[in-house]
Structures are given as C-alpha cells and as structure tokens.
Amino acid sequence: MENPINKIGVKFGLILGAYYAIFDCIVFFTDQKLFTNIPLGFLNIFVTIALAIGCVLMAKKAIGGYITFKEAFTPYLLYVLIGVTTNMVVYYILFNWVNPSAQEPLRDTLYQMAIDKINALGMPEADRLAKIQQAEESNPFTFQSQVFAWAGSILKYCILGFLLAAIFRNKSEFTPIAQPSDDTQSQNEIANKQEKNPTEKKGKK
C-alpha cells in the first residue's frame, strides 16, 4: 500500500517545482537581472515556507491527526528535494542551453553586488583583494556551481524542516514515561506483603 504522507510530499514538491519553473521562465524572458531582486527573493522564500506548512499539515490530517517527528519531516524532505531540484534544472537549462549569452549581464550584476559586499565588510587590503579575485574567477552558471548552490539550499531548508516537524509533531511523542518514586515502590511492597501474610497464617493453622 502506498504511503499517503510520501504521496503528499511528492504532490507538494511538484507544485513548488511548477512554481519555480514558471517564475524562472518569466524572469528569464523579461529581465534576467530580476534574479538578483531582493523582494522577489523574499517572495520565493515565503511561497516555499507557506507550501511547506501546508504539506506537513496535510500529511498530519492524512494519517488521522497524530504525526511523529519522522512522519512530519519525511514528506517535507520529499517536497524540498523535488522543488529545489526542479528550480536548479530549469535555471541551468535556461542559462546554458536556451540563451548562454544571458549569463554575462547577470554575472556582471552579481560581481558588482559581491564587490559592494566585500567593500562594506572593511577587511584588510590583502584579504579584500583576495576576495575580489575570487569573485572575478567565479562562474555561478557552471554545473558544479549549481550543484553547490543546490546542496546549500537543501541544507538550509532541512533546518527549516526540523523546526516545522518539531512544531507540528504530537507533543506526547517525546514526553518521558513517569517512573514511580521510591516512596511509591515501598508502599507497593508493603501492600504486597500484607496481601501475602493472611495466606501464610492460614497455612500455619
């Protein structure tokens, strides 16, 4: 029998993947510099978190309202893997196959943003020059760079997943079972002895 929570994770992952595919295509064919737009970046984060909450809540409902930490995190992980992987693949195809010439303007924008950030840090001159050289040599559009970015996104979203799973799991899951105190154990032993004594007395008579 197919696991309902896994099915929900796949479903929401496909929804997130479709959202990112549409978003990437719209931005790519209108203005590639919008990929560096901060408000749009926050919009993507908001959509991802909103769908993540919906995914965990629907998984909890599908199994009767009781969900463990593992059962909450599993569909979330499937959701993130599918959505983020779709985003990476579409982004890579657009900039490396559809129109590779679009890399240069966006790369210049990313380079300037990196330089502004480096200068704002106020680091020693030698370190500043080393960082600038590193920014000049970096190419965010290679497959290796995309894989590193993908792994970083998965790691960050896993931290969010741990938090959501901890929030929506049933509180009794990790509640320790109360152990009887020494006084309670002593009282139980005395009661057991008292129950046995009448039987022993009858045997002696």
Image (cartoon, rainbow, N blue to C red):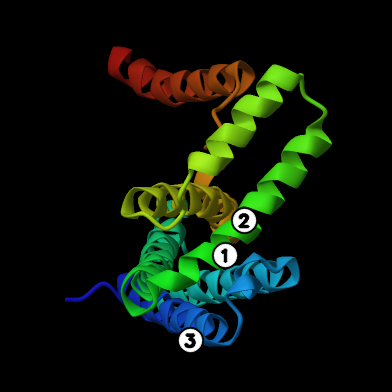
> Do the residues under discs 2 and 3 have CB atoms within 8 angstroms?
no
| Relative horizontal placement of residue 113, taking residue 165 as reference (left or right) | right
Residue nearest the observer in this picture, 130 or 143: 130
Residue 128 spot, x, y in % from top left: 70, 27
List x then y, in percent, for residue 52: 54, 69
Residue named by callout 3: 22
Which mark, by number, is residue 106? 1
Q: What residue type is labelled 2?
A: Leu
Observer-side mark, 2 or 3, equals 2
Tell me the quadrant of the picture where the C terminus can be found. top left
Image quarter where the N terminus lies is: bottom left
Identity of the amino acid at label 3? Answer: Ile
**Residue at left 67%, top 46%?**
114
Task: Give the residue displayed 42% in from the left and 77% down from the top.
Answer: 17
Of 161 and 166, nearer the camera is 161
Disc number for residue 8:
none
Whether residue 167 is visible to the viewer of this picture, yes or no, is: no
| Label 2, label 3: how far apart the Cα atoms are | 22 Å
Q: In the displayed structure, would residue 118 be above or below residue 83?
A: above
What residue do we see at 45% from left, 50% from top?
A: 139
Which of 196/183 is in front? 183
Name the element at disc 1: helix
In primary-sequence order, the first of circles 2 and 3 is 3
Foreground label between 3 and 1 = 1
The residue positioned 75% from the left and 71% from the top of the image is 39
Q: Residue 110 carries which label?
A: 2
Other-residue count near label 3 (Cα within 10 Å), few / some / many at <14 / 14–19 / ≥20:
some
